[in-house]
Amino acid sequence: MVQSESPWKPKQDRSKERDAKREAVLFAAASAFNENGFHNTSLDDIAVRLNVSKPTVYYYGASKEALLSACYLAALSLLDDVTQRTGPQTATGESRLWVLIVAYAEAILSVYGRCLTRVPDNSLSAPLREEVRRLKRTVDDRIRSVLSDGASDGSLRPTDSKLTAFAIAGALNAAALWFEDDGPRSPRQIGEHYADLFTNALRST
């Protein structure tokens, strides 16, 4: 029997297409939140950016709050991932701190990372807000751990790891408030500048 070519895509292809469209909606939402603020952005604004209808945006995000939640989780997932990859444990604390700062900068200066910094978490549901804060504490603990390892192996000066971790994260988070994609420096270049700044200041010799 001769079978005609089906106009329907295979299930796997449909799934990939759906994921790609959802990612496009989230990216557009995060960009709009970053530029205009959460409360000054509507689903219509996001639809205009994508040249699609409002129901299409609604299909991939049940509400503006749901889109913000997804953007927050994307940013935190990225930060959670990069702060776990600071190089081999056999490396010095100084070199691992340098890698961590650059990775943190690239994550927080991404579209989703900037959304995490620029949009207050009081727009999130209480359970998600607590999850966000838990993940932030986890990232903070990783920075402190690298600082402590550096003090132990002699590559970094002993400091109050809590205050120093706050200073590092605070400086990088602040950069996310002024960074623009068309600026003179890339996220990597900014990260390397901050990494040099902090490791030079904290180096034991």
Image (spheres, rainbow, N blue to C red):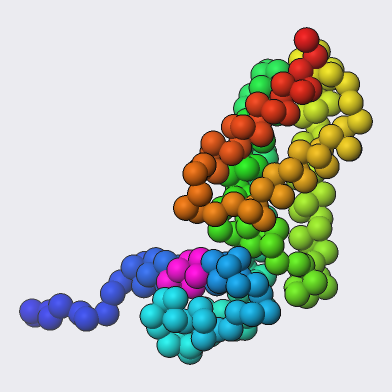
Choose between 42 and 71: the one closer to the eye: 42
Q: Is residue 127 magenta?
A: no
Image quarter in which the N terminus is found: bottom left
Foreground: 26 or 117?
A: 117
Residue at 75% x, 75% y is: 123
- Evaluate whether residue 161 shows in this view: yes
* Above or below for 22 versus 6: above
6 left or right of 137?
Answer: left
Residue 3 vs residue 185: left or right? left
Q: Residue furthest front?
A: 184
In this rendering, is residue 63 above or below 199?
below
Name the image quarter holding the C terminus.
top right
Measured from the top left, where is residue 68 in percent x and y? 64, 71
| Residue 24 counted in the magenta span | yes
User: Does residue 78 appear in this view?
Assistant: no
- Residue at x 34%, y 68% (from the top left corner): 13
Question: Residue 29 location, x and y as percent?
Answer: 55, 72
Counting from the top left corner in percent of width and height, residue 129 is at 79, 67
* Depth order, front residue of 20/101: 101
In the rendered image, the vertical position of residue 108 relative to residue 64, given as above or below: above
Which residues make up the magenta segment? 21-28
Q: Is residue 47 left or right of residue 33?
A: left
Q: Main secondary structure of the magenta part?
A: helix
Q: Quadrant of residue 87?
A: top right
Residue 194 lies in what quarter of the image? top right
Going 75% across and 73% down the picture, which residue do you hit? 124
**Residue at (83%, 64%) from the top-left corner?**
130
